[in-house]
Image (cartoon, helix red, strand yellow):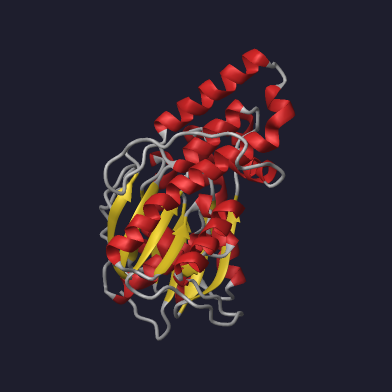
């Protein structure tokens, strides 16, 4: 394997419906290209087969664009980091296969990255053309919230992370998406709930918290509770949703966010951490960000939120994660396979 004076990592992300490539040079991001897949809007959710086909079409131009934007050649790359899992298996196969093939052609190592750990590593992303931003100090707590995962993670260092609380069934992001569908929103509906919630009264309607042990969550019952809530009120007034949309969105959103931070506060007290971060696609939610900042002021926590473009799936976080693994010499072999489900 050849070695460069500079450490230049190509990151590839293909876990769901976004094809992304990024280039990191000596710890700083120089490009981050994302291709979205609009086709899924017509189906109310991501269709795995369509997603994998779109990845096959997008990955070559996305990688090419990322390399050009970083103003490097492929021969300068030190390693290729890719998402091993968790995610949709067909989508993961596209990114994994591309990374393996490219590494063989260039005779450079590959680095397998855990998607959810990469979301946490998004907090350490620095870009080459911006001033250094502050980052969490170890140890810290990170609430990772996405369409498929909800976890409270204790981070002791870059590569030492422990899940101390998580959902026992559905994820918070799924609870948002399911509610959005019931309200008649197009996919993805989470951002639409957030938009309407800004105009509503968060205390108008009340929901209950599930009873779960420790720092864990449960959102399955909450989705059902929301369904029955709508059905009951629509029987009394067929126009209930249209007349009260903003208040419904605001009340439901506030309940989920309050539930999330209820356990986060317990985790902070239990661990004694003073730095608190959020990550994942749902971290783009404006109310979640505001609640984090308010909790930080109230409890005197140092709070951290990734830049908006690094909350949703992106390759910059994969390259960042790969960089930390590269420094420790933790490379993957060519016989590695992606995993739809993977332990933390």
Q: Where does the N terminus fall, quadrant-wise?
A: bottom left
Measured as percent of width and height from the top left, residue 212 is found at: 31, 39
Q: Residue at x 52, y 68 (%)?
A: 297
**Eyeballing the image, is 344 above or below 70?**
above
**Eyeballing the image, is 53 above or below 21?**
above
Measured as percent of width and height from the top left, residue 241 is found at: 68, 26
Q: Nearer the viewer, residue 105 or 66?
A: 66
Q: Nearer the viewer, residue 201 or 7?
A: 201
Q: Does residue 288 appear to the left or right of 172 in the view shown?
A: right
Residue positioned most to the top? 235
**Location of residue 107 (image quadrant):** bottom left
Measured as percent of width and height from the top left, residue 117 is found at: 36, 59
Q: Nearer the viewer, residue 129 or 186?
A: 186
Q: Residue at x 26, y 68 (%)?
A: 330
Measured as percent of width and height from the top left, residue 197 is found at: 66, 43
State whether residue 10 appears in this view.
no
């Amino acid at each position: 394997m050849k070695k460069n004076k500079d450490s230049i990592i190509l990151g590839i992300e293909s876990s769901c419906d976004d094809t992304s490539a990024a280039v990191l040079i000596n710890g700083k991001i120089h490009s981050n290209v994302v291709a979205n897949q609009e086709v899924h809007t017509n189906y109310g959710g991501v269709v795995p087969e369509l997603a994998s086909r779109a990845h096959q079409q997008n990955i070559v131009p996305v990688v090419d664009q990322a390399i050009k934007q970083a103003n490097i050649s492929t021969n300068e790359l030190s390693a290729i980091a890719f998402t091993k899992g968790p995610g949709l298996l067909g989508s993961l196969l596209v990114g994994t296969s591309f990374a393996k093939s490219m590494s063989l052609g260039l005779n450079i190592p590959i680095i397998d990255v855990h998607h959810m750990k990469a979301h946490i590593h998004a907090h350490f992303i620095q870009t080459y053309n911006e001033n250094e931003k502050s980052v969490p100090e170890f140890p810290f707590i990170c609430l990772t919230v996405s369409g498929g995962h909800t976890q409270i993670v204790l981070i002791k260092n870059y590569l030492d992370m422990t899940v101390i609380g998580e959902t026992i069934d559905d994820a918070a992001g799924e609870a948002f998406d399911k509610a959005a569908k019931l309200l008649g929103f197009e996919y993805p509906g989470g951002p639409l709930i957030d938009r309407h919630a800004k105009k509503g009264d968060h205390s108008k309607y009340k929901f209950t918290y599930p009873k779960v042990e420790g720092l864990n969550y449960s959102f399955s019952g909450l989705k059902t509770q929301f369904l029955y809530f709508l059905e009951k009120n629509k029987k009394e007034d067929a126009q209930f949703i249209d007349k009260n949309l903003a208040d419904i969105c605001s009340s439901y959103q506030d309940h989920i966010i309050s539930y999330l931070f209820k356990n986060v506060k317990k985790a902070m007290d239990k661990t004694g951490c003073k730095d608190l971060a959020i990550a994942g696609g749902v971290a783009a939610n404006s109310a979640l960000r505001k609640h984090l900042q308010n909790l930080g002021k109230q409890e005197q926590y140092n709070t951290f939120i990734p830049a908006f473009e690094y909350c949703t799936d992106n390759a910059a976080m994969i390259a960042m994660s790969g960089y930390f693994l590269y420094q420790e010499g933790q490379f993957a072999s060519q016989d590695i396979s992606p995993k739809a489900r993977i332990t933390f």
